[in-house]
Each structure stands twice: as C-alpha cells, then as structure tokens.
Amino acid sequence: MAGGRWRTVSQGVSIETLAFEHGLLWTTLADHPENAHLSENGRSPHVLEPGDRVFIPELAPKWVDAATDASHRFRVKGIPSHFRMKFFLDGQPRANAECTVLVDELEEEHATDGDGLLDITIPVKSQRIEVRFDPVPQDEPPVDTSFDDDPAPEEPEDEAPDVKDVYVFDLRHLDPTSSHVGAQARLRAMGYDVGALDGELGPRTVDALLSYQEDSGLEPTGELDEATLAELQKLVPG
C-alpha cells in the first residue's frame, strides 16, 4: 500500500514501541483508519496479540521557518509512557506505601497514593519492572515465662534476611481479553487457578471461570461469554 506498510507483531510489541521505532506518536497509529480493527469490540489498541497486523504510515515532513544566522532549539514531541498498578494487602489498598522500583537496570524510590495506586513514567522501550515493598512487621504474641523458675538463657538468633514483597511485571505481554490466554492471565492475576497459560479452556480454567462468574454475580456458564469478557475488561482493558 502506498504511503506506508503493514507490520505483523510478536509478543512484547505494543503500539507505543512501534510508534517509537518509526518516529511517530502512538496516537498516529492508534487513530489511523487502517488500524480501526485494533479497537473493535471494546478492545484497547494498546493490547496487541501476536499475529496482529498494524499499519505504519510514512513520516510526513514538517517545515519550519527559521533564521539562518541564529541558534534554534527543537524539541521532539512525544507522549510519556506510564506504568499504573494498584496494590492491595489483605484486601485493602496498600496506601501511601514506599517502594523501590527497578525499571530494567534503573532503580528509583517511589510511593503509592492514598488508593494504593503506583503511577510512574517509564521509558517506552522498557520490558520489565520490579516493585519491592518492605514487608509489613508481624506482631508476635508475648511469651509467658511465669511458670519457669529458672528460664534458660536465650540463644542468639541468626539475623533475619532482608526479605521484601516483590512484584515482577513483564511489560506488553498481556494478550487481549477476547483471547483465551488473555482471559486466563486476568483470572490468574485475581487469584483464580487456571493452570498453565496455554490458551486451552481445560477443566481448571473452566472451574476458575465458574468461580469468577459466581463471585462477580454473573451466570455461571464456565464459558467466555460476552458478559464475562465485559467484566474481565474492567480489570485490565484490552
């Protein structure tokens, strides 16, 4: 096709990474008429499935009038990429919690907001994120030694290792909800046992679907029907 070309994507490729690679804004790709199929049935264009075809238009030149006897500064226009994730602990938002975030090889200190949401700007080409929280101290019950007339001296305990709550995210690897693998991944993220993420609606995935549908007030069909897909998309659009 004149004026551009088609690209078949693989796992880990997104609209953002494609646009960055070709010097375009992601909105240029997402809003292009040839890519309307990526937003069908409520699907987010940010959630691509391996094998999806994306149209890449040619770069359009832009001319700027500027004096030749002066220095000029040009800034590349872009839209920052964000990582947004809400964290919970014992069913409650992990509010205002300090954490260490490792984006590829870069380590930074951040904190969640009052709703447990972590919202940070990351490089477009980032592939992996680790979020590390300090563990919540557990109150130990007091030891009753009143019955012991001559308690034995306490032996020194080995220093406890510095254990943290660690969450690891492979970015841009979540398939659309309408795919079986995408639905399995969302169910697993909510704690339902789907077994392997193999795209097969086997017995464990069906049991997980039934449990999720009952917990969500849906008709327990054990199938990825429209109502179930719509509810799953509320968790992670796409």
Image: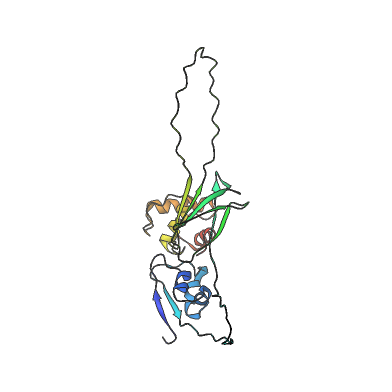
| Residue 165 spot, x, y in % from top left | 49, 45
Quarter of the N terminus within the rendering: bottom left
Residue 89 visible, this orientation:
yes
Asked if residue 143 is positioned above or below residue 112 in the image, the reply reads above
Residue at the extreme front of the image, as rendered:
69
Residue found at x 44% / y 79%:
56
Asked if residue 87 is positioned above or below residue 225 in the image, the reply reads above
Q: Nearer the viewer, residue 53 or 224?
A: 53
Residue found at x 58% / y 54%:
117
| Residue 112 spot, x, y in % from top left | 58, 52
Residue at the extreme top of the image, as rendered:
149
Q: Nearer the viewer, residue 173 or 193?
A: 173
Count of number-bearing discs: 0
Q: Nearer the viewer, residue 182 or 75?
A: 75
| Residue 221 spot, x, y in % from top left | 46, 56
Residue 223 visible, this orientation:
no
Asked if residue 70 is positioned above or below residue 218 in the image, the reply reads below
| Residue 140 spot, x, y in % from top left | 54, 30
Q: How is the image coloured?
A: rainbow
